[in-house]
Image: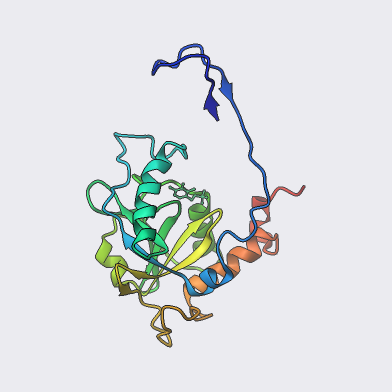
Amino acid sequence: MFLGAEGLGLRAKGLSTHVMIAAWDLGPYLSPEAKRCGLRALTSSWARHHVNISLCRAKTSGHYVNSMLALNTAVKAGFDETIMLDPEGYVAEASAANVFLLRDGVLHTPEVTSCLQGITRDSVIQLARDALGIEVRERRITRDELYTADEAFLTGTAAEILPLRELDGRKIGFRAGAPAVDAPIPDDSVTARLQQTYQHAVRGELPAFKHWLMPA
Ligand SMILES: *Cc1c(COP(=O)(O)O)cnc(C)c1O
């Protein structure tokens, strides 16, 4: 949704409101290898928005300038993704995806302050709790908790659930069988089980989550 071009100025007075829906065949957003093997990320030197600087719960195009600065710095340095910290230095999210970590069988994800309250984040929290019986805690998370996590992954509508294998050159967990960072994650990892459960849920194969879907 955007304002019209009837005038110039921050007061935005008398401007019409437009709605545009861009629809095209997205195809796989990331390679199938990325889903199985995951991503390598760099912690960004660009901070994520602060709650008193912007409406962090809104998915506005203006926020993406911040995401692009962070992502492009990481990509130019040879990484796939970036992890952005909030202005106080705690983990917020990736450039356009939320982040989770697993530690001792419990999932942790940043509380909704600087990060977007993503739909996939919410879906994964419900699937973990109700379908897999895994406890989920929303709280402040430090970057070294990601370094030492047993597993970590990113969530988003386009990304779905993507393993995070390495942050700042440090390998993240997935210790069962200790696969190399470019090898697929183990099928019995929580990340892989959540990926499978998510695929079943969004295809209407889980009766308990069918109410998420709107049949065409
Ligand atoms: C879109 C987006 C997400 C993921 O949200 P979903 O609703 O799951 O697609 C997370 N963080 C940012 C900054 C985003 O733009």
Q: Please state the horizontal and vertical placement of residue 188, each as a whole percent of the image.
A: 51, 80
Q: How is the image coloured?
A: rainbow
Q: Please state the horizontal and vertical placement of residue 90, each as a whole percent of the image.
A: 26, 54
Residue at image position (53%, 14%) is 6
Q: Is residue 155 above or below residue 112?
A: below
Q: Farthest residue in the right direction?
A: 216
Q: Farthest residue in the front direction?
A: 76
Residue at image position (61%, 61%) is 28
Q: Is residue 154 shown left or right of residue 32? A: left
Q: Is residue 207 shown left or right of residue 121? A: right
Q: Please state the horizontal and vertical placement of residue 112, each as a whole percent of the image.
A: 38, 47
Residue at image position (42%, 36%) is 62
Q: Farthest residue in the bottom direction?
A: 177
* Camera-side residue of 55 and 102: 55
* Camera-side residue of 74 and 62: 74
* Camera-side residue of 37 and 121: 37
Residue at image position (35%, 74%) is 172
* Camera-side residue of 34 and 157: 34
Tell how many labels: 0
